Structure formats: C-alpha cells, structure tokens
Amino acid sequence: MTPRRSAHDVLTIALRKPGDVITLRRCTRSVCRAAGLTGSPLVRLTTVVSEAGEHLLGAPGLSAHLCLEETDTVMVTVRLHWRGDHRPPSPLLSAAGRLLDDSRLTGPHDDGRHELVLAQRTAAPAASLGDLAADVRANLADGGTAADLIEVLRTQNGQLLAALEESQRQQEELQRLNAELEETNAGVMALYSELAGELQATNRRQRPRLTSNRHPSSAREAARRDNIFEHAI
C-alpha cells in the first residue's frame, strides 16, 4: 500500500526566461537549507532542477512548484509542469535517477500537461512541516533570495580562491618535477659520456695487444714459406 502523501506548497514560479531559471535555482537552495538539506544532496537537487529548467525553457505553460512533502519521510520536491512536445533529454533523466532520491517523468495527463518530479530526502524538521513551509514562504517573500544570492556569491568566491590555490600548488609541483627530471637527464647524459669514454679507452688499449698477438703467427708463416722454397731449389 502506498503511503499517504502530504504536500505543503512553498512557491510557484513561471519559467519564461533564463532569469526565471536562476530564480528557481536560488529558491530551491533556500528551501533545501530551511528544510535541513545541505552538502552534496543540496547541490545535486539544485543542479538537476536548474538543468531541467534550462532544457525545458520555451515549453508552453512551463512552471515550477516547490513544496515539502511527507510520506514515511520528508522530501524537498520540485514539480515542473508544461504542455506541448518538449521533453527533457535522456542523459538528464538518467542523471536525475542516479543523483536524486526520487525522479519521475509522467504525462501527458488528461489536461495535456507533462510533469517532471525531482525530489531529495531530508531529515524530519523539529517543527511541523506546514509551519516550516509557511516560514520558508515568508522568508522568500521578505527577500530571502537576495540574502541567499549573497551567500552563493561568497561560496563561489571561496571555491574560486580554493581552485586558484590548488592550481598554483599543482603548478609549483609541476615545476619541481620538471627540475628533478632535468637533473636526472643531466646525470644520465654524464654517465653515458663517462661510459662512452671508458669504452673508447678500452678499445685503444686492446688494439696494440691484438696487433702483437698476430705477429708470431705471421713470422712462423713466413718461415714456413721460406723452408718450402729452399727444398724446392
């Protein structure tokens, strides 16, 4: 038996232009944080919601409904509705299925609408879900998204600085490795030159010895030829 689903609406956004998708992303992030959803699960939901909004932008009647839903667990849910032939790309649907706790594409329904459900599980709040939804609505109405945007910018600046520091560290490490490689190559070339010099010296020392080793046999051969010549006379 399917558990009874209790939904508490937070916000509905009509998606008509790219700026609306940005607003959707910020509001989704605000709802997630208010519901206690942070870290990787928050990033996954906001990213997939944003990508879905961008891909569906231009579909007739496109809108996003943010809500808090409760069955046997609490879910931060975004429901995208639209009409027409638009469909999210298969790679996005596959990614949503891997990254999110719930991802469903249904439709067209009797009213001609399609629905894409994107949801992430979170811990049950201390207050009732209805009270939490009301608080989030009030926060968004009071300009909470502006404060959230400032926080996003701070986070992005921190991430940028961290990335720059990591890039600098990697560059320094690369320079160190290149220096070690050049030093190793110089050592190998020096060793090669030394071995080549020793080989040449060994060859020079062996030449006179080989020449002297050939002289006795040459003398005996000459004497043998002279002896044969004398007997012939």
Image (cartoon, rainbow, N blue to C red):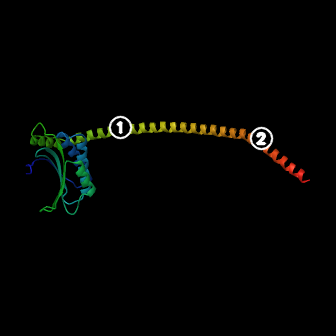
Please name the residue shown 13% across and 61% down the image. 109
Dot 1 corresponds to which residue?
A: 162
- Which of discs 1 and 2 lies nearer the camera? The answer is 2
Dot 1, how many residues are within 10 Å of its Cα: few (below 14), some (14-19), or many (20+)?
A: few
> Looking at the picture, does residue 68 appear above or below residue 81?
above
Dot 2 corresponds to which residue?
A: 212
Answer yes or no: is residue 62 visible.
yes
The residues bearing labels 1 and 2 have C-alpha atoms spaced at a distance of 76 Å
Of 36 and 15, nearer the camera is: 36
Please name the residue shown 60% across and 37% down the image. 191
Helix, strand or loop at disc 1?
helix
Q: Earlier in the sequence, mark 1 or mark 2?
A: 1
Please name the residue shown 69% across and 38% down the image. 201
Of 57 and 138, nearer the camera is: 57
The reply, left or right, for residue 224 in relation to residue 164 is right
In the picture, the disc for residue 18 is: none
| Residue that extends furthest to the right in the rendered view of this protein | 233
Helix, strand or loop at disc 2?
helix
Q: Amino acid at mark 2?
A: Ser
Query: On the image, which quarter does residue 75 sit in?
Result: top left
Q: Amino acid at mark 1?
A: Ala
> Looking at the picture, does residue 196 appear above or below residue 16?
above
Q: Position of residue 43 (x, y in %)?
A: 25, 44
The reply, left or right, for residue 72 in relation to residue 91 is left
Say if mark 1 contacts mark 2, CB within 8 Å. Answer: no
Dot 2, how many residues are within 10 Å of its Cα: few (below 14), some (14-19), or many (20+)?
A: few
Q: Position of residue 23 (x, y in %)?
A: 23, 48
Q: Position of residue 61 (x, y in %)?
A: 18, 58
